[in-house]
Amino acid sequence: MPPNSLVVAGFVVGALLLGYLFYGRFIAKLWGIDPARKTPAMERPDGIDYVPAKHWSVLFGHHFSSIAGAGPIIGPVIACYYWGWLPALIWIVIGSIFLGAVHDFSALMASLRHKGQSIAQVAEAVMGKRTKIIFASFIWLALVLVIAVFVAAAAKTLTKEPAVVIPTFGLIGVAIFTGLLMYKWNMNQLLATIIGVGLLLGLIILGYHFRLDITQIGGVFAQHPVKCWTVILLIYGYIASVTPVNILLQPRDYLATFVLYFGMLLGFVGLIVTHPPMRAPHYISWSTSSGPMWPMMFVMVACGAISGFHSLIASGTTSKQLANERYAKRVGYGAMIFEGVLAALAVLCVCAGLYWQGSPGWNYPEIMADEGGGAIVAFGKGYGQITSSVLGWISGRGPEFTLQLGMLIGIMTIKTFVMTTLDSATRIGRYVGEELFGQSLRIKFFSNRFMSTSLIIVFAACLAFGAYESIWKVFGAANQLVAALALMVVTMVLLKLGKSAKYTLYPAIVMLVTTIGALIYQVVWVFLLNGRWLLAGIGIVLIVLAGVMTAEGIATARKLRVRAASKTE
């Protein structure tokens, strides 16, 4: 008999919470948090990037909504389809506690100890300029993949589900208004939040009744709707990335978090009420059409367990907004644990909310097929099934209405965080581009934030016009490889500070071996055999850069050990 989904949820959430309380506290002590030490946001506010958040919860909202994106939902949904829900959940729990949260928090602390600099600049401080250039190049390429994959996913969702168009873009105006309430007019944060969230809920209801289908415009919009949305989203990403953080980024991400709070709360209440059995297989096979469980499942889950993109957020925007170090653990470590809970909810929605056989339209494998809509639709439908009874009790409406409303809320949850990831990734791409091309390579043209942003948008567009499924795997591997290299950098920081570095070194080794193995598998057995030359080329470049940087890391570690030994003599 398959286990009850509520029992599974209790084990997973309980384990993640214990990890935060105990292992998170241990890692925080390792870094030596000092509330009396001024943060970069307090030392050098500039009104554009270095802006102290009004409250730690505002920064948590920005950080969590930026790191969450669609990754912790799409990745686990795909992984369960190929390998089963049990391996995916085990990796989500272990990865989140011992690798992902340690990675995120350590990247934040390393940046705070280096005046809010990005993880690439921290690499220069502890490993040298050549390493910084290599790592920055790696990060820049990874960000191109991040922007491309989420733009393509968002464009497909906006085309297939026109009900999310109004809340998706209406949130921009609501966020700016909420930001003005809090920062310009000094309104009480709670009142401003209630107004902003109320307007956002109104947008979701409006979107349900008025579905803006871009194909109805006619012409090129009817012929190529996904491509048109792709262009619109890229333009949005450009504008959002050069706008001061307190005008759009902070308030929009803060409000977006409440979408997720509501969505997660509703999802878990639905599980309590319906508690369906786990209908999908707990284990399918070691080797599948998507590759062997190791290393492919570990990179497929992506942000649900560990994500290199998180180190870019932690050191790129979050470290520049943290007002006091006492909140670093809540934001850095806590947000990743919360993301693990989100990933677990995604697994429960598709593996308990959907069916594995029969039930046309609500069949997990059928939806995952190309014509079925893929992972986003699978999550939305599973979420709709789980929350239907709760929404029926609230609204007094029948199952036809509540299933569709639940599906809309589920997809809107994903869609909101795709947008936050999009502009955060573009903004960080601007930072890295300015550092790499403008400062390190001294191409003054790209020291300008407008030109640096244009460069990464153009490169991302070249990939985004393809199907996002084709680049998800290389995105996952590149993303995890950034995490391995970021863990290597923070390991050097800890060694330089004279602290024990094994708690970041061992995760770095695990992720380095796993992700390089995944890239080699994809390049040799997937991309080259199928003539995907661009993706094969990107994979080869990433492998070479990772190898060179690993060699640099080993050399640096030896030097630091020699220095430490000479000091003790």
Image (spheres, helix red, strand yellow):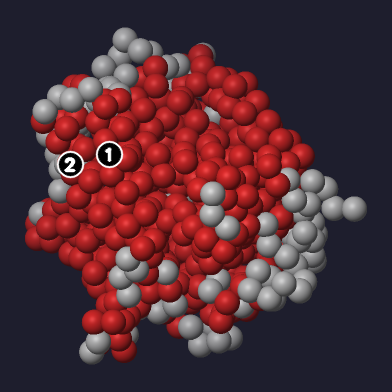
* SS label for mark 2: helix
State the SS at label 1. Answer: helix
Q: Residue furthest front?
A: 396
Q: Is residue 467 left or right of residue 462?
A: right
Q: Residues within 10 Å of mark 1 (few under 14, many from 20)?
A: many
Which residue lies at the image location 39% right of the left edge and 17% below the top edge? Answer: 326
Q: Is 298 above or below relative to 43?
A: below
Is 132 drawn above or below residue 81 in the view shown? above
Which amino acid, mark 2? Phe
Q: Residue at x 26, y 58 (%)?
A: 169
In space, the residues marked 1 and 2 are separated at their CA atoms by 8 Å
Q: Position of residue 44 (x, y in %)?
A: 16, 26
Name the foreground residue: 310 vs 58: 58
Q: Residues within 10 Å of mark 2 (few under 14, many from 20)?
A: some
Q: Quadrant of residue 452?
A: bottom left
Disc nearer the start of the sequence (1/2): 2
Image point (90%, 53%), residue name: 1
**Nearer to us in this view, 492 or 88:** 88
**Residue 554 is at least partly visible in this image:** no
Q: Give the percent coordinates (x, y) of residue 541.
A: 43, 68
**Count of numbered circles on the image:** 2
Circles 1 and 2: CB atoms closer than 8 Å: yes
* Residue nearest the observer in this picture, 161 or 341: 161
Residue 196 image label: 1
Residue matched to label 2: 177
Is residue 404 visible to us here? yes
Report the amino acid beneath label 1. Gly
- Residue 373 percent location from the top left of the image: 53, 74
Residue at point 50%, 48% (across, down): 395
Residue 98 found in image quarter: top right
Extreme-right residue of the structure: 1
Q: Position of residue 314 (x, y in %)?
A: 37, 38
